[in-house]
Amino acid sequence: MSRAAVIGGGISGIATAYYLQQYGLDVHLYESNSQLGGRIGSECIDGRWLDFGGKNIGRKYRRFREFVADLGEQDFEYFGFNTSQVIRGRVVRLNKEKARLYNLFRVLTLAGPVGILKLIPLIRAVHKDREQGFLNTPYFNAIADRFDHESLASFFPKSCAGHIIRPVTVRMNGAEPEECYPGNFGSNLALVLDSYEQLRCGMQGMLERFQAYVRSVTLFTGHHVQALECRNGKTVLHYTCGAESFQKEYSKVVVALPAVQAAELFRHSAPELSALLGQVQYYPVAVAIARYREEVFTDVQRAMVFDRSSPLSNAGAYGIRDLDIVRYTFSGKTARSMITRESDPDEVVSLGEKIVKPYFNIEKNSRTSFTYKYIWPGLCAYSPHHYRRLEKLDELIKPLKGLSLTGDYRRGASLEACFRAAAEAADLVKGGGLRGCSRIHKELCAGRDPDITV
């Protein structure tokens, strides 16, 4: 049986190992931490595993749902969309579950007429062809060519950028609208246009099922790959386990790490490739999950996003029935200026409680337990003209036989985008070439430009 190595045990590495196993390969999966999961990892509080990221599963996540089904029957539960924000001293609620016309009016009001005119063609493109909801697709590459000289903050009017765009970018990319670009915005829209469920067993339950399911995947947790060296058509892994150092050679290798971590692997062996990977922008995020004695939220108000003056970007119920569990997310410029890796977790959670106290049942509601993570690399904000960097990346990888790269910077940060990118990377090292061709891509190949009127 042919053997392949996958570096990184986050969702991208798990997906890559899954697809390589389907191709009949014997897979070695390397993860530097003691357990799989990466940024979708979980922690146990009060005897229950709680997920820090990635737990929301879109109804349109075809590849990821096929993966879950292969692991064995797992129940889903509706997550819903219910959020609020404070605008000029008033709480404005958005709720997909009811009063849809009212919520549509709210969105139209917040975006303004110019903002709506800018949004409509982008939304229409993703709604008409779901392929445009990934990174590096023809429609949004054409958008990048025209508009990526300016950020989303400049592309959209001020009200739209602040009240519609920012709650999306700060949550999905950890970035302000001035740090994100129109050519990548399709990946954000795909998330906004979907509806969501979560696994009853949580992501930890899924990870446990994956480890029980794999037949030809060997897990090397606690193995830190520090460098890669390509020679004679093979890739040599230089890694440590404990205090010892090792080398191992493979004919097929997929690096499934955030771009900034992948850059370190090639720092000496392929400096141009390393520099290009290092240009992909990431921002840190701090996440706390806290349980309280009584319910914090009500059925009609389960979450709130905060403006750029607040280090807390959003706070919400962990699940539709978990109204006593709060998930605090600290991201954006103000959070970066106030919260670091060295910040005291209890102080960070207390800061979040102080911010949400006027809106939710916190003041006389004692916290019984909490768990906290400062995540770096955090959320990926890609780069301007990102698809051009990806094209250059592929040019640099091409001579390195049997080597491929995947991760959140390839097709987007959603679970589905990571599975899409992993399938392409697995297909590439297997030797099958990239799969799939969207309708708009076919039009471009036929010499017809897609409609990108904005």
Image (tube, rainbow, N blue to C red):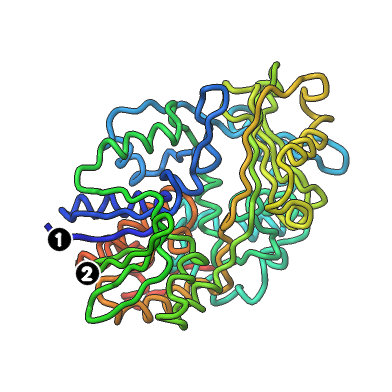
- At x 35%, y 49%, the residue is 14
Residue 286 at x, y = what percent?
65, 47
Question: Quarter of the image containing the C terminus?
Answer: bottom right
Label 2 with label 1: CB-CB less than 8 Å: yes
Q: Earlier in the sequence, mark 2 or mark 1?
A: 1
- At x 21%, y 64%, the residue is 430
Q: Secondary structure at mark 2?
A: loop
Give the residue pinned by disc 1.
Answer: 2
Farthest residue to the left: give it: 1
Residue 118 at x, y = what percent?
64, 61
Figure quadrant of residue 446: bottom left
Q: Nearer the viewer, residue 448 or 95?
A: 95
Give the residue pinned by disc 2.
Answer: 251
- Judge the density around disc 1: few (<14), some (14-19), many (≥20) Cα neighbours within 10 Å: few
Residue 344 at x, y = what percent?
74, 43
Q: Nearer the viewer, residue 188 or 274?
A: 274
Question: As drawn, is 309 to the left or to the right of 7?
Answer: right
User: Looking at the picture, which amino acid does disc 1 mark?
Assistant: Ser
Q: Give the vertical position of 358 relative to 136 (above or below).
A: above
